[in-house]
Image (cartoon, helix red, strand yellow):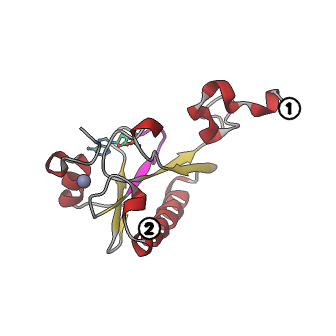
Amino acid sequence: MALNENRDECPFCDRIGDGDFIAESDVAVAFADKFPVSRGHALVVPRHHAASLFEISQAEIEDVWGLVSHVRSILQGDLAPDGFNIGLNDGEAAGQTVGHAHVHVIPRYKGDVPDPRGGVRWVFPDKAAYWLNK
Ligand code: AMP
Ligand code: ZN
């Protein structure tokens, strides 16, 4: 089954119905990731059920990114991380597991991994460390 076919069993539609958000707008909400990879890992999720962020309107996308910025500021104030990874897995081939579009806001802390260089490049571990091949 394609990622977005069954909205009746969508964990994010359920979660949006529960309320209790880090932040929200007319278009999107932000809540804590249930299985955080770092302290404060949050998801920004359009209220409208769509598998890809790029299936919603340009105005909605802009609102989502505004909420990402707002959540980043909240997490910066609350947790004082040293950096962030912000991004999305767009499609199953790219690693998306929940078929309701979402942006990950992942606070990073000095020393949380031995060598953070490369960040999102580590989706391809054997190609991430390009500086070793320069
Ligand atoms: P992705 O693999 O990019 O689709 O990310 C899905 C994210 O959703 C993962 O980081 C999960 O930890 C998170 N997740 C899965 N189920 C729930 C849930 N019920 N509430 C909050 N986060 C969830
Ligand atoms: Zn949904």
Residue 85 position, x and y percent, is 57, 48
Q: Residues within 10 Å of mark 1 (few under 14, many from 20)?
A: few
Mark 1 and mark 2 residues within 8 Å of each other at the beta carbon: no
Q: Residue at x 39, y 38 (%)?
A: 92
Residue designated by label 2: 61
Residue 47 position, x and y percent, is 28, 64
Q: In this view, does 88 lie to the left or right of 133?
A: left
Q: What stretch is highlighted in magenta?
A: 36-44
Residue 48 position, x and y percent, is 27, 64
Q: Distance between the residues labelled 1 and 2?
A: 36 Å
Which SS class for mark 1?
A: loop
Residue extending farthest front: 1
Q: Residue at x 56, y 33 (%)?
A: 123
Q: Residue at x 53, y 64 (%)?
A: 73
Residue designated by label 1: 134
Callout 1, which amino acid? Lys
